[in-house]
Image (cartoon, coloured by chain):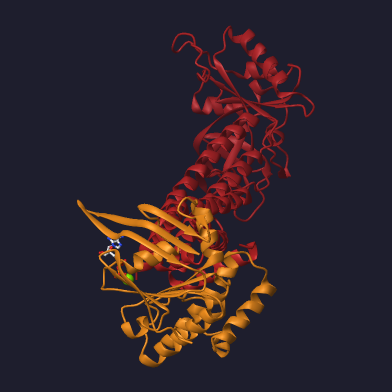
Chain colours: A orange, B red
Amino acid sequence: MIELSNITRHFQVGDQEVRALDGVDLHIPAGDYVSVMGPSGSGKSTLLNMLGLLDRPTGGTYLLEGRDVTTLDEHEQAQTRRERIGFVFQAFHLVPYLTAKENIELPLVLGGVAPEERQKRVATALEELGISNRGDHRPEELSGGQRQRVAIARATVTHPAILLADEPTGNLDRRSTADVMERLERLWRGGLTLIVVTHDPEIGNRARRCVRMVDGRIESDEPGRAPE
Amino acid sequence: MAQRDFIRLVFASISSHRLRSGLTALGIAIGIAAVVLLTSLGAGLREFVLAEFSQFGTRIIGINPGRTMTHGTPVGLFGSSRPITIEDALALETVPGVESVMTYSGGNAEVEGPDRSRRTMVHGVGSAMPEVFKMAVQSGSFLPPEDPRTARSFAVLGSKLRRELFPDGSALGARVRVGGERYRVIGVLEPKGEMLGLDLDDGIFIPTARAQALFNRDGLMEIDIIYGEKTAVVEVVKNVKRAMIARHGQEDFTLTTQEQMIDVMGNILNVLTFAVGALGGISLLVGAVGVLTIMTIAVGERASEIGLFRALGASQRQILALFLAEATVLASVGGVAGLALGSGGAALLHALVPAVPVDTPWSYAVLALVVAGGVGILAGILPARRAARLDPVEALRAE
Ligand SMILES: Nc1ncnc2c1ncn2[C@@H]1O[C@H](COP(=O)(O)OP(=O)(O)O)[C@@H](O)[C@H]1O
Ligand SMILES: [Mg+2]
């Protein structure tokens, strides 16, 4: 499903070249559950943004579902993001002036999905994440855990193939962390390819596969505990 | 994205930033209000002045001594122009197309009644004056048609002068002195009101020849001609000009048609209206800069929201459209508010000070709205493009 070969991403900072990704080879089959760990600044987020087509590599090739996506134009990339990829962020990134429902609906709205279909999908997503009674609340009225659940619902309402989560529990307390991870893993069991960036080994080790990054390179790639 | 959803999203965003949206719209509203108010005053003034002019009727041609160089044609030697005379006026009466001819010469003089006197305008006119200037006689009669060179010492009073000189009695048949000479009052005019600050009711009307003698003048100040309703102005002008040149040997006079005058006046006042409108346009420009500034700030503040939209699959074009629509909606809302404010203000001004003529030209108002929308698009395009071009990764990192 995901095939990265010799991916590099360089940033020019002043006259210094920062190699955020420095030759990454990675193969992730459909339905895998991968955690990406490593020290701060090792390139985890850059890798995730690359996978999500928010960023373009400086070099190398990226095949997504067999298609070279680095050569797609901006419009095609946006469409691929909309249809195949879901994002969950550490900072939730809910739109403050939209209700939970409207936030979840947003990618469907952007994609031009008809209202009746949207209604159905949003209701299902709300139910799956156990926040049906919070649909009409605005983000500011929700707890951190609830906000992240709304964000997960929003990321999956389009039925994407891949869910990319960058430190999804970074802003959450223990209880919410456990809850959010369980939700994500339940979605993975449903067939979603799940990739989670984290610096928390306890979370990282839950994955089926643990990728460790250092200085823009993959240092190790080992099986994790893997949840049932 | 469906159009309905697009609109809903734009309005959700606008109404979520109430203060900012309000201020943005206000900038445009003030600009539009200024344009509408100022052009209302300008157009009001135009209407007013034109009405003042046309109260005399429009089939008048004026002849004045001297040649004004309107077409850059060189005139004869300086000072070679001859005065226009009562004889000229008599000759013009037979010119084809001419209906009636009136001579005019006037000035200021002391008018003495039986117990009061007053310094006022003395109009030396011909018997055709009521017809030419559309003035009516209230009592008695106007100056009789007789040979203007030997006209008798009759006088007709304006209504206000009548009140001043004869506060409690009829003036008909009474004797007044104008510049020391005795006149018999044979009529009083109906009130006509002011014309461009000149109070026509405060004056006395005597035969032209007598006024010329009084003020010691050779020539007339003006000859006014009324031409027939079915006659073409250009025809009459041509005929009158030919007749006058035949008498004077050269074109040492100026013809002005009332039509021309109203045209010229109208043009001047149009320019004036446009100029004050442009002045209001400056505040509209300030409003536009306001939209530009606030939208630019908004793009900065909402960077992470923009990044999120991109992550959720919004294309650059969608982001551009959203921000552009926001600016346009804000400007248009401001435009509508400004239109209400401006025309309301104009109406209020007129209600409070009725002397101030106002007329809200709806064509300008519609134009103002279109301009407001256009300003929104123009002022919104730069920030919207900035929003669309934000690097989504950077944008998501912004807090
Ligand atoms: N836009 C950028 N400009 C310059 N340097 C950047 C930029 N984005 C990331 N970097 C650098 O790339 C490296 C990897 O960053 P990142 O992927 O965010 O690390 P992580 O998520 O593992 O903490 C860091 O050294 C960071 O400073
Ligand atoms: Mg990171």
* Vertical order, A96 against B287 (above or below): below
- How far across and down, in percent of the image, does residue A16 sit? 20, 54
- How far across and down, in percent of the image, does residue B307 sit? 43, 65
Tag count = 0
Which quarter of the rendering shows the N terminus of chain B?
Answer: bottom right
Residue B11 in the figure: left or right of residue B224 = left
* Vertical order, B296 against B190 (above or below): below
| Residue in the picture at 53% in, 47% down | B42
* Vertical order, B247 against A100 (above or below): above
Most distant residue in the left direction: A15
- How far across and down, in percent of the image, does residue B170 sit? 67, 50
* Residue A175, image quadrant: bottom left
Residue B287 seen in render? no
User: In what quadrant does ligand 2 lie?
Assistant: bottom left
Residue B174 seen in render? yes
- How far across and down, in percent of the image, does residue A166 sit? 39, 74
Residue B335 in the figure: left or right of residue B97 = left
Looking at the image, which is closer to me, B43 or B356? Answer: B43
Looking at the image, which is closer to me, B122 or A79? Answer: A79
| Residue in the picture at 67% in, 72% down | A115
* Vertical order, B279 against A95 (above or below): above
| Residue in the picture at 65% in, 53% down | B169
Which quarter of the rendering shows the C terminus of chain B?
Answer: bottom left
